[in-house]
Amino acid sequence: MQVFSPAQCVGYVAFVLGVAAFLQTADRRLKLLNGTQCIAYGVHFALLGNPSAAATSFVSSARSYLSVRTRSPLLAVFLVTVNLAVGLVFSRNGAGWLPVIASSAATIAIFVLSGIPLRLVLLACTFLWLANNLLCGSVGGVLLESTIAVASVSTIIRLAAARGRTAPSNGA
């Protein structure tokens, strides 16, 4: 594996965009940066020869951008259906379903959840992507998902602390 091949370099770009996305406390900025990161990720996986991960990344990009404008459950169902079709067409083995499952769960979360619950589901999806990246030799992807996991936990803690500061007291 070449650490600085074109495929890996695009993965490093996805890494930077992904870290920036998951450090956001505002859902809108998270979604916009995540959409851009998914484009880089899609190119990265296409160059690595992982069509399932590439296709689900491009679907995830569209999902992230669309979710800024709407929270339509019908659109979420449509995008999950597209992800499942991608899995049927491109997944060559069980590992090929890891990004499909991650993208599908993230789609539901992005359209129906916000704040801490959104980030908890995205954290679970991060672990599925991490497994995918370890299996396909994505250096930038392993760095990205490992860092996103840490950034997500940090952001969840910050959001929980902020919620605790604004919670009404019992009048003691």
Image: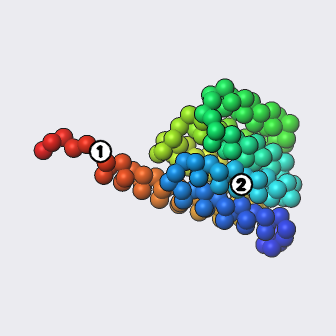
Regarding residue 60, the answer to whether it shows in the image is no
Residue position for label 1: 167
Left or right: where 30 falls relative to 46: left
The answer to whether residue 116 is above or below residue 46 is above
The spot of residue 107 in percent (x, y) is: 65, 38
Q: Is residue 109 left or right of residue 64?
A: left
Residue appearing at x 81%, y 37% in the figure: 86
Q: Is residue 32 left or right of residue 135?
A: left
Q: Position of residue 22 (x, y in %)?
A: 57, 56
Q: Position of residue 129 (x, y in %)?
A: 67, 51
Q: Earlier in the sequence, mark 1 or mark 2?
A: 2
Which residue was labeled with disc 2?
36
Q: How far is disc 1 from disc 2 in space, using C-alphas?
A: 34 Å
> Under tag 1, what secondary structure?
loop
Residue 110 at least partly seen = yes
Amino acid carrying mark 2 in the image: Thr
Q: Tell me the kind of residue under disc 1.
A: Ala
Residue in view at x 84 percent, y 48 percent? 51
Q: Quadrant of residue 148?
A: bottom right
Callout 2: 10 Å neighbours few (<14), some, many (20+)? many
- Disc 1 vs disc 2: Cβ atoms closer than 8 Å? no
Choose between 12 and 136: the one closer to the eye: 12
Residue furthest top in the image? 74
Q: Residue at 21% across / 44% down in the picture?
A: 169
Is 116 above or below relative to 149? above
- Residue at 86 percent across and 58 percent down: it is 47
Label 2: element kind: helix
Pick out the residue farthest to the front: 69
Residues packed near mark 1 inside 10 Å, few (<14), some (14 to 19) or many (20 plus): few
| Occupied quadrant, residue 75 | top right
**Front position in the image: 25 or 6:** 25
